[in-house]
Image: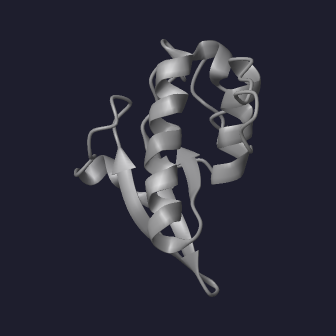
Amino acid sequence: MIGNITPYSTVASVWETLKNPREYVAGVRHKMMNCAKQHGNAEVKIGVTGRGYQPCYRITYKVGDSERIYGSYWDNHQPLEREDALNQNWATASMAADEVDNFLKEKINWQAPKGKAK
């Protein structure tokens, strides 16, 4: 990818440019699953101010028609608590928790253990 991340980028669309894609997406997935467990749903948007090597990300959840922020994080999954978390710095596209989960499983060729439910 040349230049900055596009406003409609997602975790999936930057996979090839990520510095450590498996670790990054696994960390995003972990935060999303925690959010979904607490609130029943989760979505992720990535930061669009960089080039896609190590984007920050924001996890949100829905309550009725409103979107609430669960947390914004650096690429190392530590909380992002600065002005950088402004709304205009996030992609317009998002991925739901099940989409991220399925995407990661596909990328790492994950197989459910034999005899266990998926």
* Residue 66 image position (x, y, % from top left): 57, 82
* Residue 39 image position (x, y, % from top left): 49, 72
User: Looking at the image, is 32 positioned above or below residue 46?
Assistant: below
User: Furthest residue to the left?
Assistant: 82
Give the camera-side residue of 42 and 82.
Answer: 42
Residue at horizontal 56%, vertical 48%? 45
Q: Is residue 7 left or right of residue 87?
A: right
Q: Is residue 33 left or right of residue 13?
A: left
* Residue 17 image position (x, y, % from top left): 60, 14
Q: Is residue 96 visible?
A: no
Give the camera-side residue of 89 and 20.
Answer: 20
Q: How is the image coloured?
A: one colour
The C terminus - image quarter: top right
The N terminus - image quarter: top right
Residue at horizontal 46%, vertical 60%? 35
* Residue 82 image position (x, y, % from top left): 23, 50
User: Furthest residue to the front?
Assistant: 115
Q: Is residue 86 left or right of residue 100?
A: left
- Number of labels in the image equals 0
Residue at horizontal 71%, vertical 38%? 116
Q: Is residue 10 visible?
A: yes
User: Looking at the image, is 78 positioned above or below residue 76?
Assistant: below
Give the camera-side residue of 103 and 50.
Answer: 103
